[in-house]
Image (cartoon, rainbow, N blue to C red):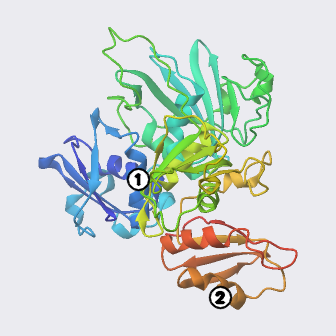
């Protein structure tokens, strides 16, 4: 893989800004090159990991710009060299150094800083226009979750219009979703997304049902199927509490997100998006090194793993069962394509819905039940872990460190997994630290081996992926 991506079937009138917006949700964009006459473009990300995250996500939901589906592949180039004349007017004068400054300066450089929300900006208000097919919470989650961690979704009808509120864990995630999706169609020719910022600081959800969903509180009751508006946390709110419309990059409402293979509108019957399965299929594993416990630890960064089964006749393949569909989709988005024990792991949806326990006489080492494991990260309702889900990176977050343990002792423990490139205790809490390995693959190995490591008689080390500084 390369950090440079090659885009084909790009409309001649597409702008640099529209190409850049495809990369914003996945990391820093450092350069862009348009080949107008060939309907092609090149997009350079800061790191290969950023590029891989983009490729993984768009392999499930290919992007569209100006009504044309974009085809993306890794480029043979390792970096781009461009000059100002090769950029369209919208971003001319925005150098690669500006682009590399990340989402904040990128959006500012594109002239959209004034559109940012005035509060925390984590909640989007969505109106679906021309809604010929039903839109469910599952549909919205599938669309928005690729831009970040979706915490809560509420859907309702106001002024005879379908509306929704979607709360992300971070404002940059909400901003990226708005940049990419405002004005796009969910299905071809219909169900157009109109997205504003909400000034609400948080959504108060009391039930998990077909109208409201809190992914941080799987323990909530289902309640009534049509809850009272006062239970949604926005009772009595008028249009004044919503941010003014902002067409950030001016995406036209052409084309659609290919989420379903619908027939022509004249012949198609309304369809509902399938809810999916809490089970994922993991393949191309290193069968000499992989184990149920290793998969439990790695996939446990993205949801509460209930069971793991390594296939008896194909030991480079496994099934991982999560507590719910949302966690399974999160794991697919973050882990598909990463290198684990020297091989590029593939993670996809499974057609099955659960893992069966081994029958008497079968090998119990290949199937394990973790339903009662004390190591689940997301079992506690409202846990901060829901807001700290990050893709694999070189940097690990360590916690539950005893006061007596030194930096030298910690780095020595991790050196068995590879080269430790950097270490620092967090300034406000010495019980936590950030440790960087030389590569992401070594960091994954370290997380698998060191999470829950007994570091003293009373402390077990907690290890997770930190927000990447790349």
Identity of the residue furthest to the right in this view: 458
- At 32% from the left and 64% from the top, the residue drawn is 1
Residue occupying the far bottom of the picture = 408
Nearer the N terminus, badge 1 or badge 2? 1
Indicate the position of residue 389 as horizontal and vertical percent values: 62, 55
Q: Are marks 1 and 2 in contact (CB under 8 Å)?
A: no
Classify residue 263 as left or right of residue 259: left
The residue shown at (49%, 36%) is 143
Residue in the picture at 66% in, 23% down: 210
Asked which secondary structure carries label 2, the reply is helix
* Residue 5 visible at all: yes
Residue 412's disc number: 2
Query: Residue 439 placed where, x, y %?
Result: 48, 75
* Residue drawn at x 56%, y 52% as measured from the top left: 172
Which residue is label 1 attached to? Answer: 54
Specify few, some or many for label 2: CA neighbours under 10 Å numbering under 14, 14-19, or 20 or more.
Answer: few
Secondary element at tag 1: helix
The label shown at residue 298 is: none
Q: Is residue 117 visible?
A: no
Residue 174 percent coordinates (x, y): 56, 45
Q: Quadrant of residue 155?
A: top right
Does residue 470 lie above or below 55 as drawn?
below
Establish if 66 lies above or below 50. Answer: above
x and y percentages locating residue 31 in the rendered image:
32, 63
Say whether residue 434 is left or right of residue 340.
right
3D distance between C-alphas at marks 1 and 2: 34 Å
Q: Residues within 10 Å of mark 1 (few under 14, many from 20)?
A: many
């Amino acid at each position: 893989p390369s950090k440079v991506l090659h885009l084909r079937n790009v409309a001649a009138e597409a702008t640099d800004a529209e190409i850049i917006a495809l990369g914003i949700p996945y990391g820093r964009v450092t350069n862009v090159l348009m080949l107008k006459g060939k309907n092609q473009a090149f997009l350079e990300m800061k790191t290969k990991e950023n590029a891989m995250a983009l490729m993984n996500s768009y392999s499930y939901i290919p992007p569209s710009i100006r009504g044309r589906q974009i085809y993306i592949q890794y480029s043979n180039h390792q970096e781009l060299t461009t000059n100002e004349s090769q950029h369209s007017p919208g971003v001319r004068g925005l150098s690669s150094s500006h682009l590399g400054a990340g989402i904040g300066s990128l959006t500012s450089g594109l002239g959209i800083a004034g559109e940012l929300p005035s509060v925390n900006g984590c909640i989007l208000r969505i109106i679906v226009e021309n809604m010929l097919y039903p839109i469910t919470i599952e549909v919205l989650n599938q669309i928005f979750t690729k831009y970040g961690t979706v915490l809560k979704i509420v859907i309702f009808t106001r002024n005879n219009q379908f509306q929704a509120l979607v709360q992300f864990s971070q404002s940059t995630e909400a901003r990226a979703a708005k940049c990419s999706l405002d004005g796009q169609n969910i299905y071809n020719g219909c169900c157009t997304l109109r997205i504003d910022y909400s000034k609400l600081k948080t959504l108060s959800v009391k039930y998990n049902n077909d109208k409201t969903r809190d992914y941080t509180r799987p323990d909530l009751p289902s309640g009534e199927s049509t809850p009272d508006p006062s239970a949604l946390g926005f009772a009595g709110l008028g249009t004044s509490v919503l941010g003014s419309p902002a067409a950030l990059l001016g995406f036209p409402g052409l084309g659609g997100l290919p989420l379903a293979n619908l027939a022509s509108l004249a012949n198609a019957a309304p369809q509902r998006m399938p809810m999916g399965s809490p089970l994922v299929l993991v393949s191309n594993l290193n069968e000499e090194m992989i184990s149920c416990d290793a998969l439990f630890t790695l996939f446990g960064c993205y949801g509460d793993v209930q069971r793991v089964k390594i296939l008896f006749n194909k030991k480079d393949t496994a099934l991982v069962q999560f507590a719910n569909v949302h966690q399974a989709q999160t794991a697919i988005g973050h882990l598909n394509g990463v290198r684990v024990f020297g091989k590029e792991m593939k993670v996809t949806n499974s057609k099955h819905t659960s893992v069966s326990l081994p029958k008497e006489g079968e090998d119990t080492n290949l199937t394990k039940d973790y339903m009662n494991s004390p190591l689940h990260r997301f079992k506690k309702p409202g846990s901060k872990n829901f807001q700290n889900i990050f893709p694999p990176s070189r940097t690990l977050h360590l916690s539950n460190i005893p006061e007596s343990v030194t930096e030298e002792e910690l780095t020595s423990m991790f050196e068995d997994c590879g080269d430790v490139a950097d270490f620092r205790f967090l300034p406000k809490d010495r019980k936590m630290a950030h440790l960087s390995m030389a590569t992401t693959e070594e960091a994954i190995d370290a997380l698998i081996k060191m999470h829950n490591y007994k570091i003293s008689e009373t402390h077990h080390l907690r290890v997770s992926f930190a927000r990447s500084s790349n």
